Amino acid sequence: MPVLKQIGQRFLKKKPLKGLVVAACMHITKETGALMTTLMAGGARVYLAASNPLSTQPGVVKDLAKYGVTVFHRDYDTDIKRLAGTRPHLIMDDGGDLTWDLTNAPDSWRKNLIGGMEETTTGVVRLRALARGDMLKFPMIAVNDTPTKRLFDNVYGTGQSTMEAIVMATNVLMAGKCVVVAGYGHCGAGVTARAKGMGARVIVTEVDPRKALQAHMNGYEVMTMRRAALEGDVFVTVTGDINVITQEHMMLMKDGAVVANAGHFDVEIDIKNVPAHVTLLAEGRLVNLAAGRGHPPAVMDMSFSNQALCAEWLANQDDTFPFRHPRIYDVPEDIDEYVAREKLKALNICIDTLTDEQRQYLNNFK
Amino acid sequence: MPVLKQIGQRFLKKKPLKGLVVAACMHITKETGALMTTLMAGGARVYLAASNPLSTQPGVVKDLAKYGVTVFHRDYDTDIKRLAGTRPHLIMDDGGDLTWDLTNAPDSWRKNLIGGMEETTTGVVRLRALARGDMLKFPMIAVNDTPTKRLFDNVYGTGQSTMEAIVMATNVLMAGKCVVVAGYGHCGAGVTARAKGMGARVIVTEVDPRKALQAHMNGYEVMTMRRAALEGDVFVTVTGDINVITQEHMMLMKDGAVVANAGHFDVEIDIKNVPAHVTLLAEGRLVNLAAGRGHPPAVMDMSFSNQALCAEWLANQDDTFPFRHPRIYDVPEDIDEYVAREKLKALNICIDTLTDEQRQYLNNFK
Amino acid sequence: MPVLKQIGQRFLKKKPLKGLVVAACMHITKETGALMTTLMAGGARVYLAASNPLSTQPGVVKDLAKYGVTVFHRDYDTDIKRLAGTRPHLIMDDGGDLTWDLTNAPDSWRKNLIGGMEETTTGVVRLRALARGDMLKFPMIAVNDTPTKRLFDNVYGTGQSTMEAIVMATNVLMAGKCVVVAGYGHCGAGVTARAKGMGARVIVTEVDPRKALQAHMNGYEVMTMRRAALEGDVFVTVTGDINVITQEHMMLMKDGAVVANAGHFDVEIDIKNVPAHVTLLAEGRLVNLAAGRGHPPAVMDMSFSNQALCAEWLANQDDTFPFRHPRIYDVPEDIDEYVAREKLKALNICIDTLTDEQRQYLNNFK
Amino acid sequence: MPVLKQIGQRFLKKKPLKGLVVAACMHITKETGALMTTLMAGGARVYLAASNPLSTQPGVVKDLAKYGVTVFHRDYDTDIKRLAGTRPHLIMDDGGDLTWDLTNAPDSWRKNLIGGMEETTTGVVRLRALARGDMLKFPMIAVNDTPTKRLFDNVYGTGQSTMEAIVMATNVLMAGKCVVVAGYGHCGAGVTARAKGMGARVIVTEVDPRKALQAHMNGYEVMTMRRAALEGDVFVTVTGDINVITQEHMMLMKDGAVVANAGHFDVEIDIKNVPAHVTLLAEGRLVNLAAGRGHPPAVMDMSFSNQALCAEWLANQDDTFPFRHPRIYDVPEDIDEYVAREKLKALNICIDTLTDEQRQYLNNFK
């Protein structure tokens, strides 16, 4: 993770997070470990809880503890509560549960709070629901939605690690298999691309007509889940919604059909009613983290560099800044572009730059 | 074009454009012909000028004249002026020249003007420059940017028709060739996908680090044009900017290199200084229209359905509506979604619909 | 066509075909023109007839006549007869009709005949039938089957030019279309790859279980033509057999379905019984030649270099050589490899060479 | 493995291998276990040794022992010797070592021997060397070369499992990486297709000009290993030859380059001289078996069905049959086709059958 590393080196000198408490609810992986130590290098005190118990890498817990990070990892609900209780200045959330707890906590728990960052599509969807209901009590940055996160982590990270995890768990030969992907957002598009790249026939189900049309134009078959249930060998949900694959759908599936979830919560498949002839992977939890190796460091580098730089950006806001008004913010454009530029540098890729003449042309109408 | 056809049938009954003058500057093709007759079915009086003389299909000019459309097609500059002089209620622009002329015309020429629509990326870039300079004098809808246009017409339409036109003009076997695509926006992404699909090795040049990174992650090589110039067999510009391929670049190219432009204006390549060992296609004009068959009707159906429905939407605004304030508007969400939905219907594709439970889940935080 | 050109330069010096008559039945295209002049450079007298009247390029006929080639191009049957009557030493056939006529001609017509070359899959299938029936009267080299022809011309040439011709003839947007390809030999595999590369959903029909399985493993749907008829938007036959798409199949097809043949003869589709709701392209003849631009020179370079070198090889055989025994011969291994090596050179591609140690390892068991 | 299962059921009734000793040197995996029990169902006494100690699945050893198979699994060289000493009627080899030992054994060890089968490309290359040197002492069937093995197991099995194993071992994000594949045979073509399907840029190195040209036409870059060494992030050898990646090559590689072997023996990379900045996976052994999950059962089904049916076919030969002459045999056409047909049935895929008219057309010249 070269970009994050470089940020860490600057943090170590400048201490932009000096004296701040950061409460983070994230998958406890090696990559998260690197983010936490970056924050500490910047001067923060860091508390961490696992956003998903199945994805926790035990070695990382130990290493972080040694390094001075307080890691809560007993019981999910209690851990989140304890995190919320640290009176954080900044939060990093992954799915929205910490945000929810802090929203419903006594005012005093939020007295230091400047704002926070949300890492996932699911979390941002929930933030939007909160904002619509006028219930958002502090500013949150939708890290998930920024191009250098959404267009990379969600597409390539989820795409590769999901298909990888399914193969690791089943040793299915994907060539010739029919893979049904529910949801054609960024993650879904990543999963379909990898499935196709492994030689599978791919079917997409969607509820949004524009995404459905896009899947169709990309050469995938588009149909209802009820019809797809009859065709598929492997099913992957990646929608952010509940009950996308129901018991009724599973009853229709072939003998030996494999069903997996790559969405944030284990609600997309009716996991309580899986018929005997169908194999559910990883208990319906995020399959790439629970049954696979999670996102490769290469994409986490970009996502987590955005996280670290957004933490710094929030820490730099002064009291008069209207920022404290609870709103959902985008990652500042220059942070996003900086991450991209540094990543290219790390990859040794040179690109063109606009000449003055070109820049002027783009800025003039005539 | 089944969606446009269906809109035409409704227009014929409802006459939503009754009494309005529409001035359109577009490529005069069969598909544009269908859009013009749809507007007339809606009650409009229609004036049309060619946005590009090389792309005009002569049969269409005749047919439209017979049908009652006034077609200007002598000299580009004069034609645009005459269009602007029709005191239109609505305009349809393709590249921004009509908008520019009307902006600089006497106020009286704009007295009836409700607003207009812009079809192309280039035109929208110019509109934005105009708006930044506070020079926008009437509202314009960025049809180009709406998902059912941008994600389809630009990607699949430009992608296929550009590669098609190059093969028609050269009979080059793309398998094994090195194709250099300058610009990785929607059009550029479409061109690269088709080039790769034909068995080419593809290099991308960009000035935007995020797009460059995306091209890299999609498996393309990314480098500067100066380096790519040494590698490529075929070059396509699709940037919306000037002098993307310079004389210096062309001097570096292989013997027999083919250079083509798929951007709106013939400014992307230094067409006055093409060395003898390089073949420039279609004089550097939009290669898919000038040397090929243009966009397939299947994508124009969506783009032009948006155009027709936006015309109706503008016509329905009353005087008190703040809309007349000169701004760049998005295509209303419901129009865009309607076009997608009707297109799916025309394709006989059924998709899932959210259950009440699912909709509620998405709208609630907890 | 750099490889053929280089052969031509050597022929000009060495005159390996001095005094020989070559009778060729081929598509009269620019590329064939180059082959004919190469043979003349080698000292041959050349007679040429069109193997398909629809594919003849009139300019080429004139140019060749000027150059001294006798071109027959009145009536197909008569032309072939006249060709056979030239008492050729060598023949070049494309489909097998010249071979058939010469087989059934009086012995005297074959008195000079050393042997010939066959260019197409269809022609080789017919040669095999002839050989099985003990009716082969002179040696023929199956140029079609040699790797540098079959794996390139048939796959990339037919693949690109077929899809190209269909788009030129219809302006169909391939993205999202369902393309049904009958036959998954080399040509069929090429057509499916290009269709997929253009964003189509691809269905394959086959009669050979191994090819069917291969298509399945490559991610294509495999089914009977009767079922595929209900699904397809575009149909391409490339089987070498008759009545692959019958009237019954076409009755099942969607309104507006497009049907085309990329096999050698116009027998694969029941062209006499095409229902009104189905569009047949190019009267069922070889669509890439009749409605498109034919094979790109890049692949013809390899096919025709094989032809020229096989002509030289036959000419070099002496009377005692058992070769005159009528058999179907492969292109000699060293000719095929030479063509590949020269092609790589022309493309500026360097490859590794076996070290002595490596060569020895491959030649030893232990 | 539905096809093998069905064969097993017939074997159980017919006992075609009654009284015969089978000596097999294979990877001891679950799939091999199924093949061994199939042979026992057919009446054979079975001895098994591991062809690669790293790939042995310990559970399978126990299960097979319980079932009555004698498994040798101490020391590779001793195990092979003991296998050879069982005086087998039939052998199944994987790489050629058992064949070699039996060739050099006293005549008495071969007195019962009818013949055997070879599973791998490497083994068949060695058999050919043996035959060229007139050293082949018993007939061997090149199972590896039969279409239903070579076109499936080698392409899809090796392709998926190799890339899978590399990701499992490294968690590298393949999107955007440069993958260098040495060797473009069936296995190599499979690996490149999967690498490309994961979003990698792919470079191929070859020594055969025709394969090099094919890789080029498929859109891959082709160059020497010395040049590729500078470009690659991940290297895979799959050539069957020695020292394809030398110390010199590795010295040129980037920091953190990953090197893996997917060829049969651990001789393709100079494993004794790997510099510190390069990561060698699985000690240079067959990466998909040593670091991954091996070939998916779906392809082993076809390979092992061929093995079982060839064993039966050999057992059915009588003494007068010229078969005992030591030669390398192809899998009989009807066995290969039977396997394909049964596989399609198991996949529920129906294909077309030739009509009488079609069959006749193919068999007639005119």
Image (cartoon, coloured by chain):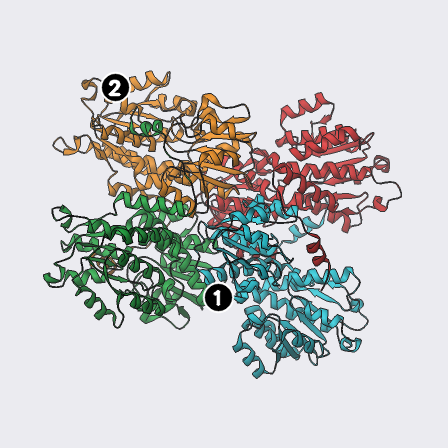
Chain colours: A cyan, B red, C orange, D green
Above-or-below relation of D81 to A175: below
Left or right, A346 with reference to C5: right
Expressed as whole percent of the image width and height from the top left, the position of residue B48 reads 72, 30
Q: Which chain's residue wears label 1?
A: D
Is residue D198 shown to the viewer in this render?
yes
Expressed as whole percent of the image width and height from the top left, the position of residue D128 reads 21, 53
Q: Which chain's residue wears label 2?
A: C
Q: Which residue is mark 2?
A: C86
Left or right, D63 with reference to C17: right
Q: Which residue is mark 1?
A: D171
Is C131 in front, or is D88?
Answer: D88
Other-residue count near label 1 (Cα within 10 Å), few / some / many at <14 / 14–19 / ≥20: many
Label 1: element kind: loop
Q: Residue at x 44, y 51 (%)?
A: A175
Label 2: element kind: loop
Looking at the image, the residue that sits furthest to the front is D13
Expressed as whole percent of the image width and height from the top left, the position of residue C346 reads 36, 44
Is B147 in front, or is A316?
Answer: B147
Above-or-below relation of B337 to D235: above
Quarter where residue D78 is shown: bottom left
From the image, which quarter does the N terminus of chain A lie in? Answer: bottom right
